[in-house]
Every structure is written in C-alpha cells, then in structure tokens.
Image (cartoon, helix red, strand yellow):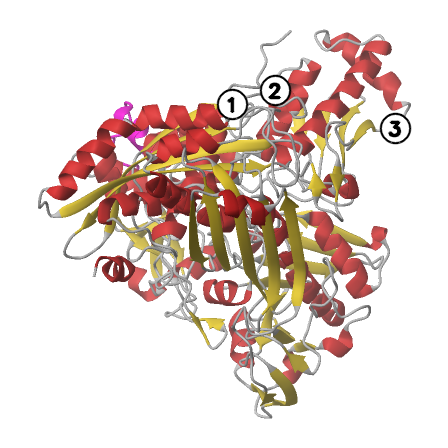
Amino acid sequence: MKLTVNGKSRDYAGNPFKRLIDVLREDFALTGTKEGCGEGECGACTVVLDGRTVNSCLIPVAQAEGKEVRTIESFGTPGKLHPMQKAFLEHGGAQCGICTPGMIVSAACWAEAPGPKNDATCRQALAGNLCRCTGYQHIVDSVLAATKKKGGKKRARR
Amino acid sequence: MPKGSVGTSPIRREGTEKVCGLARYIDDYAIDGCLHGVTLRSSVAKGRIKSIEFDKSVPWEESVIARASDIPGGNYVTLLENDQPLLADGVVRHKYEPILLIAHPSREKAYQALSHVKVEYEAETPNFDIDGGGRVFKDILIEKGDPAAGFKKAWKILEGEYWVPHQEQTYIENNGMVARVESDGTLVAHGSMQCPYYIQKALKAIFALPDERVRVIQATTGGGFGGKEEYPSMLAGHAGLLATKAKRPVKMIYDRSEDMAATTKRHPCRVRFKAGIAKDGRLVAQDIDVVMDGGAYMTLSPVVLSRGALHATGPYECPNVRVRARAVETNTPPNGAFRGFGAPQTLFAAEVHMDRLAALAGLDPVEMRRRNMFREGSITHTGQVMGISLGTAEVLEKTVRMSGWAKKRKAYAAWNKAKKPTWRGLGVALVHHGGGFTGAGEVYLASEAGVAIDREGRVRVLAANTEIGQGTNTIFAQIAADTLGLPLERVDVAVPDTHVVPNSGPTVASRTCMVVGGLVHRAAGRLKDAVLAAGGSFTDAKKLKAAAAALCEGKPERVFIAKYEQPDWVKWDDKAYKGDAYGCFSYGCAIADLEIDRSTYEVRLREVFTAQDIGKAVHPLFAEGQIIGGVVQGLGYALLENVVMKDGGMANASLTNYIIPTSADTPPFKVAIVEKPYKGGPFGAKGVGELPMDSPGPAVCNAVAQAIGKWPAKLPVLPEHVLELVS
C-alpha cells in the first residue's frame, strides 16, 4: 500500500493490521512518535492523519492507505523550529519530553483551527495528551504564547 | 566576567531534541541483532511453583529462556536487604513476581510465547492486611518529652485515623532497558533510570562481575518520580541475564499494564493520630502511630518509613511527642520510592488533624498553624533545633495573601448556607520536607562529583545524577559556569555512564541540586583555583587554553573531584533517632479552592495557591515547573488516582482505568517562590523536587471540610466518598 508520510510517498508491504505507530517507528524509523499506553489514553503517539489528530496506537496502518500522515518530525528541525516548538522551549513546556512530540502535534493543530484561544479552551483541547511532569501550566503558557505570536496561526506546511 | 546564569532561566539543555522528537529514549534505539525480552509472572499472590510446562507445539528453539538457575552470581536484587529474588526460585510471594524470561527476535512472538508456558502452583493463603502478622521490615520509635504527662495536662484531646492508598508514578515512558555483553565480557545496561550506580551495584552481584566489567548508561528518560529509583535494577538484571545467555543484545520494554501491575508504587499508609492542645490552641502532646504496607520484599521500605516518621508531626513544635512507625510485609508487589518518599503519607494525617484541632480550639485554621509552626529555636521531635533557612511563616503568609483567605472563607461559609447548586471550600496545608538523605545517609553515600577541563579549555560536569525532566543538565551547567565565571554555553554536562562519571549518588531525595549541585560547585571551585594558579583566566581564552594544557599534563583532560562532607551543624544518632534529621528543610504551603456539586458530589478545583521555600531557585522556570508538576501529582493523589487492588494485584492497571489529571482537570495556579537561602546548598539552594507533593492532599481535604462540614480521612476523595460523608 501507499501512504504519504511527512510529504513523502511511502510504500508499505507488511501486515495491514500493524499499528500505524509501529509502522512509523519500525518501518520508517520515525521515532519521534512515542508510545505511552497503547490504548489511546495518553496521546504520546499523536500524529496528523489527513488533517486530523489521531492516536497512532489505535490505527491499523491499512486505515492510512492513500492518506497523508504528519509526525512531529515534519513540524520543525533544530535549525528551523516551528513556533510551537520554540514556545515550548521558552516557556518550560517540555520537561522529561516523552509527551512533548504528541503534545506539540496536538497544540499546533489546535492553534491552526478556528475558535477562541484562551486558557480554558486550551486546557480542553489538550485534555487527550497526558503529561506527568509539568502540571500543564507551562504547556498552556507555551501554547498560548505560540498562538499569539505572528506565524503561530499560519496554516501548517503540508 | 559574564553575567551569572544562576537565578535566570536559560533554555533547557536537551530541550531542542525533545521538542523536535529527536531525543532518543531507550525504545527509540534500533539495535542490530537485538532480541526482545518478556517476563513470565506469577498469577498467584503466594505459593510454591509445582511445575513449569512448555507447550510442545511452540518452536522453543527460536527463543532464549532464562531461569533462576541461569544466574551466575546471587539471585537477588541488591538493595537494603538482599531478600528480593531476581527470579522466583520455587516460591512466589506476590502476584506478578517474575518467574522466567523469554527472548525472541520478534517482540510479538515473544509475547505470544508467554501464553504457551503453563505454571502450576501449590497456592498458599496470602496476607494482604497490614495487621495480618507479616514480617516487620522496620520499627521506629521517636520520643520527646513525656507524652503521657502532656496528655494529662491537655485542655482537649483529639484522636483520628487516616488512610492513604497506593499511588502509581505513571511516568509517561514505561520502564525499558537494553543489555548487551561486549567482546571483553563487559555487561552494558542502557536504559531509562534514575540511579545508574544502583544498577551497577545490583548487576555486579547478579553476574559476579567486578566494577570495571559492568557499565550502566542512562538513555533519555521519560519521567521517574521515584518509580525508576530501584526497579530498573531488576529490569537490567533480567535483560542482562537474557543477553548473557543469548550472546546477543536484548531489549526489554514494558507495556503500560505490566509497568503498572508489576513495578513499585507509593506505600499505602495508616496513621493513628492523637493530639492534645492547650486552651490557646498550642500543642501539648502528640502520639502518632504509623503503619506502612511494604509489599512482599523490603526494597526501600525502611527508609520510606523513616522519612514518614521524621515528618509525622507536621512542621509544628510540640513539647511531648511519641512517634511509632512500622513498615510491614504483605503479599503484594513491593512498594517503593515515589516523590515525597513517606512524607506525603504522614503529612496528610498531620495536616488534616491540625485542621480538626483548629475547629476544636475554635480557631481559624491559619491562626492555628501560626501558633504552632516551627519558629527560630523550635525543637523537633528528634531534638533538631530549627533556625537554619526557616521559611514556615513566609510560605504560610504569602499563600494566605495570594488566596484572599479570610474574605473567601467568609464568602464560602455564606455560599454554603444559601441553597446553591454547589458547596464551596477553601483549605490550607503547611508542610516541611527535609532535603537529601536522612541523618547520616549522605555520609554513607560519600558522593563524588567532578568537573573536568580538556586541553582546549572546554569544561565538562561529571556526575551520575540523571536528567529526568527536572533540569539536571541545565542547572549543573549553570552552577559550574557561574562558579568559574564562564558563559553557560562553554560548559558541557556528561551523560551519566558509570565508565565516565563518578558516583555522585542516586537521583532521589530532592538532593540533585542541593547536595550534588553543591559538589559540582566545589569541584568547579577547585578547578578554578588550579587554573588561576597555573596562570590561566576564565575571561581570556588564550590564557585559559595554556593553563588547561598545562593542567592536563599530556592527558586528554584533568578532572577535579569534590567529595561529600557533612556540614558541621548536622549531628545525627541513627540508633537513638536523635539529632539533626536533615541539614535543612524546605517549606511549602498550599491553599485549595474548590466546589462540590450537590447532586453528583464531584469535587472541582477552582484555583490553587502555593508558596514554596526552596532556598534559591537556580532556574526559576524549572523550579516553578517542579512546583506545579508536583502539586498536580498531589492533586491527583487527592482526587482521582485510585489503585484498585484485587487478589493482591492492581486490577485497574491501565491508563483507561487509573485516572491521572489531564489539562482539563487541572486548575490555574498562583505560585510564589520563597528564597530563604541555605548555607549548605549551592548559591543557597535547598530541596525542591518532593516538597510540592506534600501539601495538596491535606489542603484538598481541608477545603472539602469547609464545603461539607466533615473531613475526609482517606484519599482519594471520590464522589462516593463525599456521598458517604454527607449522608
């Protein structure tokens, strides 16, 4: 089957029921997507599937056939950080870092989506991404700072 | 001279890799020829293993199987007492106890293989009751004054019983380890951990290897909270055993349910608290009985208990005190380290009891605390004279001011009388937390940290303390850079690797910044003196390089080591439990503002206020992150986190059924950092990591008490518990 991952067309010939997270990590060596629970509760494995955030541990790869997948690796690089990544660095949004890729994917998608951007809506939007280190305040600070900054509201590069 | 970095909040050292998804946790390493290891665990809580049968339809030659009989050295995981087997040998003492290990090139097939091994047990009656007569791991008695005489003189006496349950650390990265044996026979363990040298010590015993043949390296670690203090020694032993037998690298990564069911948790604890007060509300006597459930093996229970006993009075002076504390065995998975390490359990009882005493005395809860809290010259139950870096009054008053205490308490009293759809409450808790190991613990550890300079003049911090999210990498660089007068970016921090860094002790007990940061500061001071003596300068690159080259004497680098020295104001008698339990304490106060739905009994936090005295915030943003993160773990303990034990095992071992706070459950915070400098810490710093965990539980219960007029005596405060209290 074919799918697009981070803008590149990819072939996959393995088990169609293999979880998308395993295909990304094992077959495509994209280890930025993390597994925290394997049952869709923690959000560490969040990726974007055709514009919507999903838990990649719950998706068989067959469901991504012909679709476009975006992982944390496509959002920015150390030399060219996404505004959300930069905000997480500046406002203490990442501590141990294991939830961070999924959190940034969720936050960046929320920042681009329509709707009011404030403390309460941000907390609701990120409720599917568990963090055990920060107590969320610095994550919320990071996300709101990035949504306010110029560039933070731009559509994500596809 | 560059502007100092201590007290500022530079970018997290490894932050860029983390936000880009490039930081490598142990499961992110693709290892050639690697096998995947899995663990067969006991399905009964107590019994003898009668037989182990392997399903003949499975091609077992594809797998490597390791059992207790394959262990080259001792079949135990080194800790306080070597009572915990690496693999059960004929007898199981708790559910999920490891029995044998299987490794296979395919992770999926390794897991499948587990269901094709049949273990038959001769089950015995397990004991799950702390009063059930299990082995007593430790029994502590602390006495001050004459409690009996104190109670005789008391104006009023109040008794209460409190219960706090297990709590799961729930780091988002599960435990994971890779082991391999190198061509020279060196066993290498690489993985998620807090304490590389604990693992090294355990592996030496399991494999009967000398120091230099065991190498332990930390991978980026996705949270610890105590849960990666002792358990990784077990996991490294398992991976090492399979790797030794397979002669190939072996990776073992737990899934969430195995991690939750099989690894350590916070000790459940019962506290019976009796206190007498004089008419003015001052304490005249305390009699506190503490029992902690240690689980099936000793692990760290005696020291968890010790910290619990040492904090059991709360941050209050009382002339007559008796604390009796025991940690006992039950047939459940061993409990272990979790942020706070015994103190959140006993402080919960102390602080809820203090609130109830305030009501008995007819005093406002804040005023009651003002009258009893540690002041300069107060004497604790171990005889420690308070006065060094004492922040009780400041954290209390600051939090009270931030919260608008008096006005809000009054408003909520009125709110609760009017028939609104909710009850509202404001509750306070005041706590202390000793930094570093208890008493002479740091002397026994005898930690060493180093600062190295290479021939180019590049500086590197060498310590075994791990970055687990709290900021170790960044703050060690800050401390070294400021000591030397170097810009921050010219100081590196070594990855904890037992072949590279000295043993600076475990990453636990709020000691990384205060104790090990102090060693880094002193080692950097020695380096500075040497460079200056060699004609070098930290502001002149050329001179620095010349001095560095001279100091290296042809070698790649020169290391300056600092070894722990007990401050001269710390005197401790471990036998009598008398003296200075800690070099200093940190102090925290939390005020919880909440409301309870009158029809669903659900508790909703409105806002949380906290002030915490941590001596000096080396990195204020990280310190605040520790405080908020710790308080939220405490709020989870207070309101959500409910480990359900059934037949001696966790019945809800999944993130679907064990609920930790989400962003939507978490209220906005007002945080104040108080800095009462500690002369024994680098730049005045003292412990910060655990303190925030201590106050939320009792603050929430005390707020619930204002809302419904009754104090919950156990955690978590679930709706059904509120219903019980109001009906």
Q: Which amino acid does label 2 sit on?
A: Leu
Chain of residue at mark 1? B
Residue B42 in the image: x percent, y percent? 57, 78
Label 3 marks a residue whose chain is B
Q: Which amino acid does label 3 sit on?
A: Lys
Q: Quadrant of the N terminus of chain B?
A: top right
Same chain letter for marks 1 and 2: yes
Residue density around tag 1, few if under 14, some if 14–19, many if 20 or more, within 10 Å:
some
Give the CA distance from mark 1 to mark 2. 9 Å
Q: In this view, does B65 lie to the left or right of B612?
A: right
Image disc number at residue B555? 3
* Residue found 71% across the figure and 52% down from its top: B198
Labels 2, 3: front one = 2
Q: Name the residue beneath numbered marker 2.
A: B488
Mark 2 touching mark 3, by CB under 8 A? no
- Of tags 3 and 1, the one toward the viewer is 1
Which span of residues is magenta-colored?
A143-157
**Of marks 3 and 1, which one's residue comes earlier in the chain?**
1
Subunit bearing disc 2: B
Q: Can residue B568 be seen in this view?
A: yes
- The residue carrying mark 1 is B10
Q: Is mark 1 on a helix, strand or loop?
A: loop
